[in-house]
């Protein structure tokens, strides 16, 4: 492997990895707080991309198709889809909170199907173009071309994740979130409004997924109803690698997964069709040998 | 799967028996009434009807293509009926929905057989057409396939089915001709791992190698994936002059965009599954100058302007990629029945074998394997957000 190829794949891996990390963060937060694998998370990402596209096509008339339009779409989509996450939690998950763990898992699958099916019915399975004027301009490092869009994208997702980490570790609500994740009953006794904290967790997780969706939509230039499925699986894998429930773990897992994909598919004698084999093979290895992931701590089941 | 299928068919058989019994009872009760009504009807039923089955995806993700096929075939049949039918008989049609799904295709096929159709036209997805070949073959019904073009269909054919669309190996030949014309020497072939695209990728790679070309890279991507950067990097470092993408338009548009974004300057050629306005929309400016091996669509055919206008007037929608060919197949089957001089299915199959038909989409003449003698794929190029013919 030449140095150019190495740098190029490093760049590729960082970009995909930053998407994975954004989505994995929501997975991890929800799991951390209510111990639920939110299978609807990938579909929330897809909904975020669609809401972003709709907003973008409206605001584009006034602010153009450049950065301003994308930022407007990003913020609006994060707000709307964040609220959608709260609604899903209120009607699909809260009634099941004291039910056996399996029931709520099945509800999550159901919520995923509802979101996916609604999007299919509304869009007719079409692929929609998300055409921005961001352009291919950028800097060249020998033969490797890195566009400004790619740089901003990675910077934006790192900023979002850093903001999230600061929120969880520095603010009162973040403290409440951590408390609920450790012991929901005791938190309630200490005067924490558990329902509100969980709703907030869903809002933030969904908003991050929506942000990822809009960025991916604008970057790749295409949006369709099934885009959340593969992303959901990959983000779940990233969350497990990093340690599900851990915020820095999700970021680390996402970036590692992106790099693993990029380098795995450029190994000699291994074709790109092996990319997903690497990803899900790694998931299996982690589940078998280190289920807590790289940065996770083991959860003790209380009886 | 075969066992499950057999059990399911038996179950269907039981239901059919039950229905037949109850219908017989009903028939007896209505016998008197029917006899009276029949007297009045005899004069009207003097001219027999020839029933033609249309099988197409009417629901599901490819419903739009199926709708086009049904409309265009009906348009051809209506025109024939308006001129007095064939051999003095009127033609009626009945449509069965295969939803591009193998299981539903078997149900749809059985429905057409039990309705006693004289001939069948249609078929868009190779996967859905394949299991029905045995059903129509056993019943000896002439079947003209409009869209499906996998080479697997040729092997499974019992002699009664005809492929009015060019097959994968013909597309591979057309692709290699295009590569040579443009002076491409090293090609990267990318598919999506499904039956259609991997078949086309394999056939093209073989044909190009035996024509003296070099395959610089052969990659497979995941359907539904958005990020092709790893594949793009490999293609770039392989030193390929051009990329041949054999799968569908959604992935094709993203790959095109990401290739150009990474600064790939070589040629991009797409298989026929990319003929969709969505490709041009999504690829945007990156799509300029990209080649596509297209089926004969109305926009590319000089003699199809009237058809295009009439189609739009009749159904208030644009004629899709397979409308012209569907219309031709409607005419072809009528032509075969006319030449067979009867509605006898064996005679129609013989007449189809001897077809020398010239329609909107070009010439239809069959080989001894019931495939087209000359490829109907045409290379087109994207210019100004439109597909235009390459001369």
Image: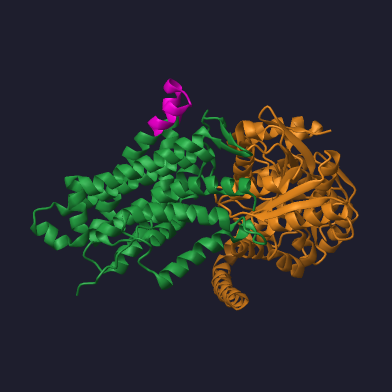
Chain colours: A green, B orange
Q: Main SS of the magenta segment?
A: helix
Report x, y in % for residue B171: 79, 49
Q: Which residues are magenta?
A: A57-73
Instruction: Count the marks.
Output: 0
As drawn, B76 above or below B128:
above
Instruction: Report whether A167 appears left or right of B386.
Output: left
- Find out whether residue A213 is within the magenta segment: no
Residue A59 magenta-highlighted: yes
Residue farthest to the top, as pictured: A62
Q: Please give the name of the residue rendered at 85% of the width and 43% of the height, measured from the top-left corner.
A: B180
Percent position of residue B265, x then y? 70, 36
Is residue B164 at all visible to an observer of this figure? Answer: no
Q: Position of residue A241 (x, y in %)?
A: 41, 61
Between A197 and A282, the one nearer to me in the picture:
A282
Residue visible at 79% across and 53% down? B204
A177 relative position to A77: left or right = left
Q: Nearer the viewer, residue B156 or A78?
A: A78
Report which quarter residue B11 is drawn in. Answer: bottom right
Place of residue A204 in the rendered image (x, y in percent of width and height, measured from the top left): 29, 46
Q: Quarter holding the C terminus of chain B?
A: top right
Which image quadrant is residue B350 in? bottom right
Does residue B283 appear left or right of residue B329 in this picture?
left
A146 versus A292 height, above or below: above
Let me know if residue A154 appears in the view. Answer: yes
Quadrant of the image containing the N terminus of chain B: bottom right
């Amino acid at each position: 492997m030449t140095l150019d190829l190495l740098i190029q794949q490093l760049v590729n891996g960082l970009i995909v990895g930053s998407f994975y990390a954004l989505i994995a963060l929501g997975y991890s937060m929800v799991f951390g707080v209510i111990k639920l694998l939110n299978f609807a998370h990938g579909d929330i990402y897809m909904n975020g991309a669609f809401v972003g596209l709709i907003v973008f096509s409206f605001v584009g008339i006034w602010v153009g198709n450049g950065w301003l339009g994308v930022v407007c779409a990003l913020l609006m989509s994060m707000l709307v889809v964040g609220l959608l996450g709260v609604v899903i939690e209120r009607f699909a998950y809260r009634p099941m909170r004291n039910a056996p763990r399996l029931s709520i898992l099945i509800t999550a699958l159901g919520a995923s199907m509802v979101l996916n099916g609604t999007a299919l019915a509304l869009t007719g399975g079409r692929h929609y173009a998300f055409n921005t004027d961001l352009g291919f301009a950028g800097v060249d490092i020998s033969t490797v071309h890195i566009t400004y869009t790619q740089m901003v994208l990675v910077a934006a997702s790192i900023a979002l994740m850093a903001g999230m980490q600061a929120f969880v570790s520095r603010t009162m609500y973040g403290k409440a979130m951590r408390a609920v994740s450790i012991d929901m009953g005791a938190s309630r006794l200490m005067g924490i409004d558990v329902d509100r904290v969980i709703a907030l967790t869903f809002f933030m997780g969904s908003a991050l997924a929506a942000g990822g969706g809009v960025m991916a939509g604008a970057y790749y230039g295409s949006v369709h109803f099934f885009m959340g499925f593969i992303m959901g699986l990959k983000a779940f894998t990233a969350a497990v690698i990093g340690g599900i429930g851990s915020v820095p773990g999700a970021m680390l897992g996402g970036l590692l997964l992106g790099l693993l994909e990029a380098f795995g598919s450029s190994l000699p004698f291994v074709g790109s069709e092996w990319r997903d084999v690497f990803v899900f093979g790694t998931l299996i290895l982690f589940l078998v040998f280190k289920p807590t992931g790289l940065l996770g701590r083991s959860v003790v089941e209380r009886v | 799967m075969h066992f499950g299928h057999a059990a399911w068919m038996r179950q269907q058989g039981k239901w059919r028996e039950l229905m037949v019994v109850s219908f017989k009872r009903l028939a007896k009760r209505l016998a008197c009434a029917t006899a009276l009504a029949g007297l009045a009807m005899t004069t009207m039923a003097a001219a027999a009807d020839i029933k033609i089955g249309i099988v197409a995806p009417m629901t599901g993700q490819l419903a739009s293509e199926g709708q086009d096929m049904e409309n265009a075939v009906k348009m051809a049949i209506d025109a024939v009926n308006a001129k007095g039918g064939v051999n003095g008989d009127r033609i009626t049609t009945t449509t069965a929905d295969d939803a591009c799904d193998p299981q539903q295709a078997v149900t749809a096929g059985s429905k057409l057989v039990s309705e006693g159709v004289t001939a069948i036209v249609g078929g868009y997805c190779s996967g859905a057409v394949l299991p029905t070949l045995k059903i129509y073959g056993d019943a000896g019904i002439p079947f003209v396939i409009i869209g499906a073009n996998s080479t697997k269909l040729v092997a499974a054919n019992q002699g009664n089915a005809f492929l009015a669309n060019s097959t994968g190996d013909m597309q591979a030949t057309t692709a290699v001709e295009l590569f040579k014309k443009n002076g491409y020497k090293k090609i990267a072939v990318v598919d999506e791992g499904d039956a259609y695209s991997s078949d086309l990728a394999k056939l093209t790679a073989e044909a190009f190698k035996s024509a003296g070309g070099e395959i610089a890279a052969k990659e497979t991507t995941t359907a539904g994936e958005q990020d092709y950067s790893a594949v793009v990097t490999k293609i770039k470092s392989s030193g390929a002059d051009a990329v041949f993408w054999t799968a569908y338009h959604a992935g094709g548009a993203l790959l095109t965009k990401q290739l150009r974004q990474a600064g790939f300057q070589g040629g991009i050629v797409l298989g026929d599954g990319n003929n969709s306005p969505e490709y041009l929309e999504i690829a945007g400016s990156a799509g300029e100058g990209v080649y596509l091996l297209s089926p004969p669509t109305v926009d590319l055919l000089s003699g199809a302007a009237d058809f295009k206008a009439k189609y739009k007037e009749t159904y208030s929608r644009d004629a899709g990629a397979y409308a012209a060919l569907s219309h031709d197949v409607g005419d072809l089957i009528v032509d075969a029945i006319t030449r067979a001089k009867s509605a006898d299915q064996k005679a129609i199959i013989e007449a189809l074998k001897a077809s020398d038909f010239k329609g909107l989409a070009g010439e239809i003449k069959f080989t001894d394997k019931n495939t087209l003698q000359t490829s109907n794929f045409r290379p087109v190029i994207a210019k100004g957000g439109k597909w235009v013919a390459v001369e």
